Image (spheres, rainbow, N blue to C red):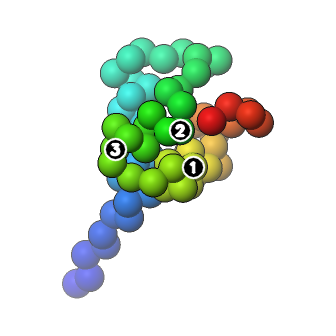
Amino acid sequence: MAVERESLTEKVATAIVAIVRDRNLQEGDALPPTADLAAEFDVSRTVVREALAELAGRGLVRRQQGRE
């Protein structure tokens, strides 16, 4: 039986969901900037952007142009 491994992007997406939950962020509240999230998770900003895109695709976050 094959065991699926979670990608780095999926791990960061899960961590971002935890931030939303732990900080009790509500609809319309801003997440920390991409650069801050990248530093917090010790990943590239590209990985954070991919994680945010995945969450946006699931309707969990809304991305706004110019908000990094």
Query: Which picture quadrant has residue 65?
Result: top right
Res 1 visible:
yes
What's the distance in space between the residues labelled 3 and 1, CA to CA? 13 Å
- Considering depth in this image, is 65 or 6 the residue closer to the camera? 65
Q: CA distance from mark 2 to mark 1?
A: 7 Å
| Nearer to us in this view, 14 or 38 | 38
Mark 2: secondary structure: helix
* Amino acid at dot 2: Thr
Residue 37, image x, y percentages: 43, 37
x 45%, y 54%: residue: 44
**In the picture, which quadrant includes the C terminus?**
top right
Residue at image mark 2: 34
Q: Secondary structure at mark 3?
A: helix
Q: Earlier in the sequence, mark 2 or mark 1?
A: 2
**Disc 3 packing (10 Å; few <14; some 14–19; many ≥20):** some
Q: Which badge, 2 or 3, is on the more N-terminal residue? A: 2
Q: How many marks?
A: 3
Residue 10 percent across, percent down from the top left:
42, 55
Q: Which residue is mark 1?
A: 49
Please tell me whether residue 63 is drawn above or below residue 54 in the rendered image. Answer: above
Label 3: which residue? 41
Marks 2 and 3, how far apart at CA: 11 Å
Percent of width and height locating residue 43:
39, 52
**Left or right for 32, reference 28:** left
What is the x, y in percent for residue 38?
Answer: 43, 44
Measuring 53% from the left and 26% from the top, which residue is drawn there?
31
Q: Are marks 2 and 1 in contact (CB under 8 Å)?
A: yes
